[in-house]
Image (tube, rainbow, N blue to C red):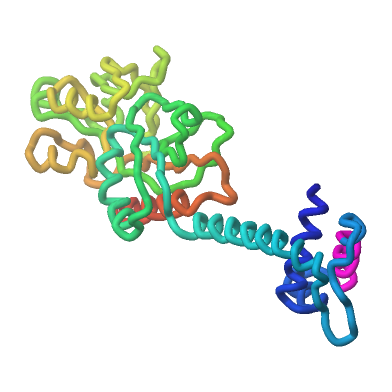
Amino acid sequence: MLDQLKRMAVLAEVVRQGSFAGAARQLRITTSAVSQQVRALEQDMGVTLLHRSTRKLSLTPAGERFHAGCAAMWAAATQAQAQLQQLRDAPEGELRLALTVGFARHVGPALAPLLAAHPGLRLHLQVEDDLTDLVQHRIDLAVRFGRLPDSPWVAQRLGSLRMSVYAAPAYLARQGVPALPQDLAGADWLALQDGTDRPRRLSLGGQEITFLPRCTSNNQLSLQQLCEAGLGLALLGDDDVADSVAAGRLLRLGAPGALVELPVWALTPQRDAQPAKVRHAIGALRDHLATMAA
């Protein structure tokens, strides 16, 4: 059946081009291969479809009736290919994006220009700090941070977030300002849960410290709130806490500038043949993170 469809497509192209040679150029095969395909089609159908002469080709009466179906099939296939190409070139349809609560605030500024430029593009956000089941939620693109666990998904680096150690003035007034990094190991730490009770390791200023968090959460925003309440130190994104620092609710420990660069990754089901909506979203997120780092 597949061979038959291929031969029908060849016939449609021969008629459209008006010659075997023209069809061969369009299909990128040899003229003899085109002739063989048409001859095989005629043998299968048991009728002559083309009158051949040294000057021109013409359809037989049976060929005219049969060619109508071949041409319709070829046109439908060409249209389907064009629609698929358009889908690859223009962002359309629903983009399903999984990300953490803390990073959700960046999605609006990052993707607003893309959504404004492409009215056919819709956005669904799957926002949760626990690892989302990407297959169950039909995720097109997931944003992840730091060291990634093994998975069949493909990771692409988007950029990084600047992180520093922060504390509330009330905590520092009560416990004193720790020297960086040697006094940090004995401080009260707030950290994201990792599913274990093991001590954490953190590299700061070229030195590694080990600490056991006193408070953990599955939500980065809740860690910031606990930190602002004076319960301990937390590693927080500089951009995320800029308003709290300006309002005096948090203080950065150490010299200005990032103590930690947290890698940001885009996870996709495949590297090749990505839909345009995914490629454009990755580019927009990467550009936004580059602007933040500037």
Q: Main secondary structure of the magenta part?
A: helix
**Does the stretch in magenta take in 273?**
no
Q: Residue at x 42, y 26 (%)?
A: 131
- What's drawn in magenta, residue-wise? 30-41
In the depicted view, which residue is nearer to us: 20 or 72? 72
Q: Residue at x 45, y 43 (%)?
A: 266
Question: Residue 215: x, y in percent?
Answer: 26, 16
**Figure quadrant of residue 38:** bottom right
**Does the stretch in magenta take in 33?**
yes
In the depicted view, which residue is nearer to us: 82 or 261? 82
Q: Is residue 294 visible?
A: no
In the picture, measured across the screen, residue 254 lies left or right of residue 20, that is left
Q: Is residue 136 above or below residue 68?
A: above
Q: Is residue 111 above or below residue 238?
A: below
In the picture, measured across the screen, residue 275 lies left or right of residue 58, that is left
Q: Quadrant of the C terminus?
A: bottom left
In the picture, measured across the screen, residue 42 lies left or right of residue 239, that is right
